[in-house]
Amino acid sequence: MALMAGLRVPARALLRSGCWLRGAALAGAEAAAGLGAGVRRFGSQRVLVEPDPAAGVAVVKLKSPPVNSLSLELLTELVISLEKLDNDKTFRGIVLTSDLCGVFSAGLDLTELCGRSPAHYAEYWRALQELWLRLYLSGLVSVAAVNGASPAGGCLLCLSCDYRVLADSPSCVIGPNETRLGIVAPFWFKDCMVNTVGHRAAEQALQLGTLFPPAEALRVGLVDQVVPEDQVQSTALAAMARWLAIPDHARQLTKSMMRKPTADRLAKHREADVQSFVSFVSRDSIQKALQTYLEKLKQKG
Ligand SMILES: CCCCCCC/C=C/C(=O)SCCNC(=O)CCNC(=O)[C@H](O)C(C)(C)COP(=O)(O)OP(=O)(O)OC[C@H]1O[C@@H](n2cnc3c(N)ncnc32)[C@H](O)[C@@H]1OP(=O)(O)O
């Protein structure tokens, strides 16, 4: 414990990225999923892609310790991986999950939103828009295997997928907690919430900044299944098989019909949305609120 305390960040990062205690179980799960010998992983520093060409599925794992916060680098690497998979006819579906233990994604990286220049905020927001549009409109079936906490921007990632499986653990909370930080979710995040849980539930969750525990997330329709932690990935792959049983062209046209009007609201006004974000995040009051929240997080750690 003393050693762990002395080496706090690296030890935590190692524990999370290596998932030491679960290594054997994961190797077993990979073998069961057909990801064993002969299949080459690819990806980048922060995004690991485990392809199963025979199944036409790739498992995309976020691995940016300590908490998969959406830094500019992680956003960029994820967009590149998704683009690559979208353009590769081998693949018909992706499972999006975390390589870290206990956290799916902590949402936007708050260090990207504090004390930076307007040009940086603009670049960051464009990258977030790009990721959302790519994932939300992807022709691939996307299943989120949510194996950890997923607040705010993490929740947005999940909502952008076609289907969500959440681990049944008290730490696996999910929801739009932005208002609790004193910030406001963009309209396209709000639209995603409304499309998933309906207007009334979305309004309450967004205003109150609710982080739902698994049973509540299932009840409100924010996720589609809640399963024991060690079954999240296999359940996601089973769900994927059901979605892949549908002919791609019919499913893709239907997905586009359902989602394009929502995506177009952003796609047609991207630059205005960037400018609105930059002016909001640059306000002194917002900078103070974000700094205070970040400091509290660090003190807690
Ligand atoms: C200005 C307008 C913006 C509009 C945008 C609206 C759309 C989206 C907004 C967002 O996504 S804002 C981010 C919201 N996220 C959160 O509130 C989550 C905050 N984090 C947590 O609650 C916890 O960290 C966790 C994810 C539940 C994990 O808990 P755990 O106990 O496992 O780890 P911690 O000790 O808390 O954290 C470790 C380490 O990581 C740092 N950190 C955590 N979250 C973030 C983050 N989002 N961005 C940057 N850094 C983060 C935390 O400070 C610790 O740092 P150290 O102490 O190790 O330095």
Image: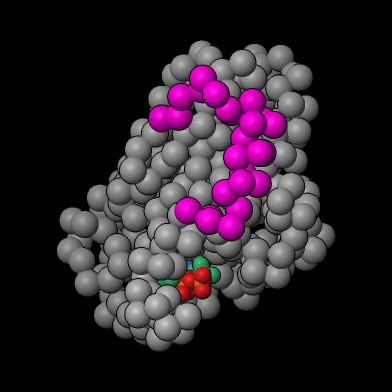
Tell me the quarter of the picture where residue 121 sits. Answer: bottom left
Please tell me how many numbered marks the rendered image carries: 0
Is residue 88 inside the magenta stretch? no
* Residue extent of the magenta highlight: 18-42
User: Residue 14 in the image: x percent, y percent?
Assistant: 42, 60
Decide: is 57 above or below 155.
above
Q: Is residue 84 visible?
A: yes
Seen in the image, is 250 located left or right of residue 51?
A: right
Q: Is residue 69 visible?
A: no
**Location of ligand 1 given as a quarter of the image:** bottom left
Residue sitting at x 76%, y 19%: 245
Residue sitting at x 75%, y 41%: 235
Residue sitting at x 65%, y 46%: 25
User: Residue 179 in the image: x percent, y percent?
Assistant: 52, 74
Q: How is the image coloured?
A: one colour
Is residue 30 inside the magenta stretch? yes
Decide: is 164 above or below 57.
below
User: Residue 30 in the image: x percent, y percent?
Assistant: 62, 35
In the image, 119 versus 300, the foreground residue is: 300
Seen in the image, is 286 located left or right of residue 152?
A: left
User: Residue 71 in the image: x percent, y percent?
Assistant: 34, 55
Residue sitting at x 56%, y 41%: 96
Q: Quadrant of the C terminus?
A: bottom left
